Structures are given as C-alpha cells and as structure tokens.
Image (cartoon, rainbow, N blue to C red):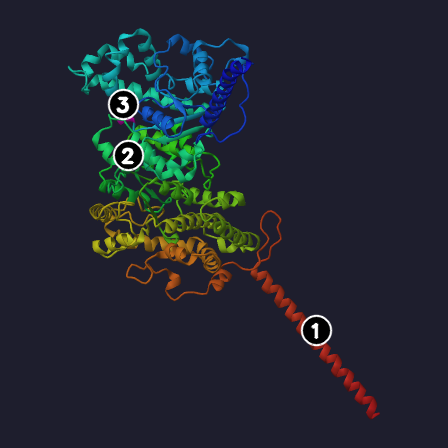
Amino acid sequence: MTRTFLMPSLKKFFLVVALALAKTAFASNEEENLLSNTRGRPPERGGEHQRKPRFVTFMISPGRTSTRSMCLLFNKYLHQRCAHNLFGEARVEDVESFVAGITQNHHPTTTTTTRKKARFESALDEAIERKGLTFFTDVPFFMPGMPCRLLVEYPEARFLYVHRDRMEHFDSVLRMHCKWDAPIHCLNANNKALRERSWGSYFQTFCDEHSKICGEKGDEVQKNNLTSLMSSIWLAHLEDYEQSVRECIPTSKLLNISLGWYNETSETKRFQSFFGLPEENNDSLALRFSRLHINDDLMPGRRQRMFNNNNNSNESTSRGKWRPLIMLTGPEQSSTLVSGAIRKALNETFEVGISEGCPMELINPACQTSKRRAELYAKCIPSLYRQKAEMWNTCSSSDLENVFHEAQNLGSWKFTKDVHLNGWHLKTLYKRGHPLFVVFRKPEHTFPASRDRGGGGIHFAFWRSLISTTPENVRMLPAGADLLRLRNYAKYVFDAIVKQRDHHIFAGTTGIRGIQECLGHFFHFWHLITVAKSLNVPVFSVESLLLSNSRDEALIALKASGACTSSSIGSAETCEAFVDNLREMQSVPTWMHVNVTEIFKDASSFSSVSLLLDREKKYYERTKCAPVLSTVTSWCRDNVRNCATVSDVYSGATVGTTLDYLSPLKQGGVTNIDEIFNRTFSPRGLLLPGGEEKRTTEAKRLQDSVVYLAVLVGSFFALAGVARFFRSRKSREVA
C-alpha cells in the first residue's frame, strides 16, 4: 500500500526536478550569444533586485535607415530580442515626461533614485527586465532629447546611428508617410503628436495636406513647393538632432555607420568590434544582413549602386556611398590652377558654404561660413583656423564620418582639394573608398613663399608642429618610425645652422624662417608621397604637366602616374578634358599660379617656362633652402627605407626625360653635398644681438693668421737661439 503510494510521488518529484533543470539550462544557454562578452551581473539600480540585461542597444537614427532589417539581424543571427516599433503608440505625455529630465545642455536634472519613474520608463524597464528585450528602434527613440536621457537611465547601453543620404532619406520618409501615416497615424491624435515630436514640425503639415502630396491613390509622392518646404524643415530638424547626439553620447558608446555598411569591409569590422563579434564572421555577417535588408522603398538606382563594386564614376558612389574625388596638395603648388581645371572637367559648380575670398577647399575649417561647421571640421582637418595649428594630429573614425556627413548636408559635391592633410588623412580617406591623388610643386618653384596669402604660414606650421609632436604620436602615423628618425636628423641639422651660422649669409634672403618653411614643405610631401606610394595612390608634379611640350606629352605623364583610373581622376576622357583645361588656363598669368613675382604684368611675355625660371632664380638668390634640403635628402637616402624612390619623386619625377627641369645645381655648379653645405653655412658664427658669442669666418681666419705669425716668429727666435748656442760653444772649443 505504502509502496504503491510512493512510486507515483517519486516519479512526479523527479519529473519536476528534471523540468526545472531543463529550464535553467535553456535559460543559461539563451544568454550565451554573440554579444554576451562580459561577465557578472550589472549593478542594481534604484534598490530594485531585477537583473539588467548584459547589453541594451538603442538604434537612435530615424526610421527608413534599415531599422526593421537591423531588428531582424539582432533577432535571428545575434540572438538578441528586438521588437520593432514596440513603443510606436506610447502616450506622448509619458514619453515627454521621460525626456523632460534633460536640460538644454543635455545633462540630467534629476536622478532615478530621487524621483518617481515616468510611465514610459516603467514600461521600458518592464520590456528589458521581464520580456528580455535588448534592442530598441523606431519611434520614439529618435525623438530629440531621447538618446541623452536613455544614456542617463542606462549608462551601460550602446547606441547605433545609421546615416543615409539626406535627400534620398527624405524621399523614403515621404513614401512611408503616405503608405502608413496618412491612413493610420494622422487620424489618431496621440500617434500624430508623438510622430510630430519625433520627425519634426513638418509632420503636422503633412497630415493636413497629405492629399496634395500622396496623389489620388495615396501611394505616389508628388514633389511640389509644399514638399520642398517640408524638406527644409526636416533637414534643419535632423541637423539639430544629430548635433545633440554628438554632444551627449560619447564616441565610445556610439557607432556611426552608413546605410550600406555591410558592403564595406572597414565598416563591417567596426560593427563587429563595437558589438564584440568575432572577426571571422565578417563575410557571413555582411551576407546575412544583405539578405535581411528589406528596405523595399530604396530607389532602383541606389539599390544597384549599393551592390556594384565596379563603379567608374568620379563621384564614386560605389556600394551606396558618397565618395568625392579629393586632391591632396599644399599651398602655392599651383593647386588652384589644377583644381580649377578638374572642376571644369567634372562640371563641378558647387560653392555652397564657403567664405568669400576662400579657395574651393570644401572641408577646410577656416573657409566655412558656419562657425559650428568649422568647429566640427577642425576636429579632423588641420588648418590655420585655430591659433595653434596641429598639422600632424589624427582623429577618431566617428569624427571623420561626422565631417563628411555634415559636408553632404550642403550637397553631394564631386571634388575638392585640401592643402593641410598629411599621410594619415590620405590613408584614412583611401580606406574610406575615396578616389585620390597627390599633386605638388618642387621646392625651387615654391619658395620664397608668399606671406600675404598664408602659404608660407602653412609650410611653417607643418615644420613647427612636427617638431612639437611627441615621439609617441609621430610613431602612430603611417611610416611613423621613419618619419621620426628623419625628423630628428633634420632638427639636428637645423639646430646646427641656428647655433653656428654666419648671419651675413642671410642678408637679402628669407633667413631662418625661410628654411623652416622649406623643411615644412619637404616633410609634408615626404609623408604624402611615402604613404601614397605604399597604397598606389597617384602622385605627380605640376611641372610634369605645365612644362610639357605638347598635349600628348602631358597626357602621357598624367597616365604614367596612374591618375586616369576610377580610383583617382577618372576615365581617359576626363583626363583629356582636364589636360585641355589646364593648358588653356595656364596661358594666362593669373594669381592662380603666379605668386610672388611681378615681372609678368605684360601678359604677352608670359609663359609657364619663364614663370618657373623666374621662381628658380629667386629660390637660389633669396633662400638658403637648397643646401639644407640636399643634406637632409642625402641622409634620408642612406638611412631610411624607400627614401630614394620618394626623393626622386620629390626632386622631380621626370629626371632623365625631356620634361626634366634643370636647376643651376645641375648645370655645372657644385655637386658635392658636403661642399654645398659647407660653402653656405660656415662652421662658426658671429656675435649676434642677444649676447651669444659667435665668431665669423673672417674673425677665425684673422685669428688663425695671428697664431700662424706668432708660431713663425717664435720658431725664428728659437732657431736663432739654437744657432747662437752652437756658435758660442764652438768659439769656446777653439779658444
């Protein structure tokens, strides 16, 4: 009797235990996913004992940025629970009261422990803690102020922002408004108000006038003055929203990627790194997301570009990206002439946002009409915008992305030049997929530099900034170890000149400042050329084009540099148009490439050859750069890898051809480098104002003459004494 009673009880007991163990194992296994790469429980908040998830991610970019596809990716492949648009119908008062904890400068006015939770916050906590959701997106998570408040309440959270071409984005948003909002949310006062807070004030106008926008059937957007007005309101709203995100979300917690991120290896790796995914899943991750990418409103042209890896356009919109052509150069390198010829070849007319009197350097902080935009650019792009120019600084990838996102807000221009970028910028832009090329003018055709237009100032800033940069920061640059060794040697040479110079040799020249400018030019282009050669980025000198004997000769030189490809200037037709424009524009003595000289007031006597001959003459008469650069270059050839190749390019890549431009040094002058240096800079100096005792060569020679005379006289008297000694001795012997 007892036995028959115990058997069912024991079976029931073991069954309950087994189910409990299975449930525990399942729960444990569920938590072990690709994103759970931290251990231990997060800290409890507000005295509550419910456990927070290990990671919570908020996608804070507006809708139509692959929000649903991203939600599916996290659900299906990353094993993170996501519910798309879960709070899309939340009470607007609850959401606003949650966001109200943020003041205008995005800092919390209260903390969770000192105030009662808002209803929205309680609902969000319940979704996280009870339902196990870890990924949130869509309305209202891109409401202004929302990301900043979320960071306060969830300090361990991460934030994802997917960027998209602004105008394409708004076109997509309008189609969504017509399909979903006009027949549904515009008819509900709460949902309408919630979307107006999220999308911007134009949403009210859309709901009132959607019949004029969505057409008779409600599924075809009709562009008109009303949509143009709405677009302007949207762009201003989005710009303010993105600015607030940048100000309150630290870069360590914010991932900025573009809509086609999964087609870019570099961006896919950033995505993996940010979410702690193993790198070996790179290709599979991109493939999985591409299959999930259900943004069916993408325009056919854009969809085709996103998956086209062989785009030959100069604008370089391959893989859905805006990648304009960028020319890296320096001041007084005939850069305005070259860029003018390229702009004409590309039919580029963009001039928006540039201060009056500035060249068309579209990302130069010092040339921006907007102070806010200038400050944003200055985080990554060096210039003389700041009082202390740091020409060798780097920046984070997110800051660089912000530069181009902001630039694109003004319009998707095709081309720009910049005279301040170093080799790190070149490598970063190359990885980003920009078509690039480097163009420069030889030092004997650059100096003496013009002071009134800031050219000498930029070259000087490159040298002074390099000297003040710490060795650790120099090593972090591409080819940093070689750059550091070369810098140290050049500084040794420069210090020797400063300490031991004969100041008479600088009479009528640009002096020590001129030498510093030449060193800045050398290091700027040494770094650009070194990095460019390692990446097969085209490099060519202005002389190879301006001094060519014919159009065909110029084209040969340009094509030989590798510039006539889709990764640089573009097709053969574009290169031909560029050369034709250049040859036409160089025939006129404008300020574009005639700098400090005034001998060409009569246009009939002007030619590029006469111009550069005049510049070369002034270079050797008015600067002392040649011996310094020769010494530094010689040491570089012997002690730095690949420096011989770089030096050949820098000194004139066309050596040995009909384009070779002979300097006086090559025309039977002094050829020994040590002799050049020693002839120019005497080993000792003279007494300069300031009390430093230095001696001139003449003083040294005079002193040596006196010493020689004294030694000679002393020797004469010594010999006379010896002769007298032997004579007196002989006299005594005779006696």
* Residue in the image at 26% along x and 51% along y: 606
Circle 1 residues within 10 Å: few <14, some 14–19, many ≥20 = few
Which residue, given by chain and number where applicable, does mark 3 sit on?
170
Circle 2 residues within 10 Å: few <14, some 14–19, many ≥20 = many
Give the label on residue 658, or none: none
- Measured as percent of width and height from the top left, residue 692 is found at 61, 50
* Residue in the image at 32% along x and 63% along y: 656
Give the label on residue 714, or none: 1
Q: Is residue 652 magenta?
A: no
> Relative to the observer, which residue lies in front, 147 or 167?
147
Residue kind at label 2, given as amino acid type? Gly
Residue kind at label 3, given as amino acid type? Phe
> In the image, which is nearer the foreground, mark 3 or mark 2?
2
> Relative to the observer, which residue lies in front, 556 or 314?
314
> In the image, which is nearer the foreground, mark 1 or mark 2?
2
For the residues labelled 1 and 2, the Cα–Cα distance comes to 90 Å
For marks 1 and 2, the one nearer the N-term is 2
For the residues labelled 3 and 1, the Cα–Cα distance comes to 98 Å
- Measured as percent of width and height from the top left, residue 60 is found at 38, 22
Q: Which residues are magenta?
A: 166-172
Q: Is any part of residue 444 visible from this angle?
A: yes
Q: In the image, is 191 to the left or to the right of 152?
A: left
- Measured as percent of width and height from the top left, residue 678 is found at 51, 62
* Residue in the image at 54% along x and 56% along y: 502
Q: Quadrant of residue 454?
A: top left
Which residue, given by chain and number where applicable, does mark 2 sit on?
320
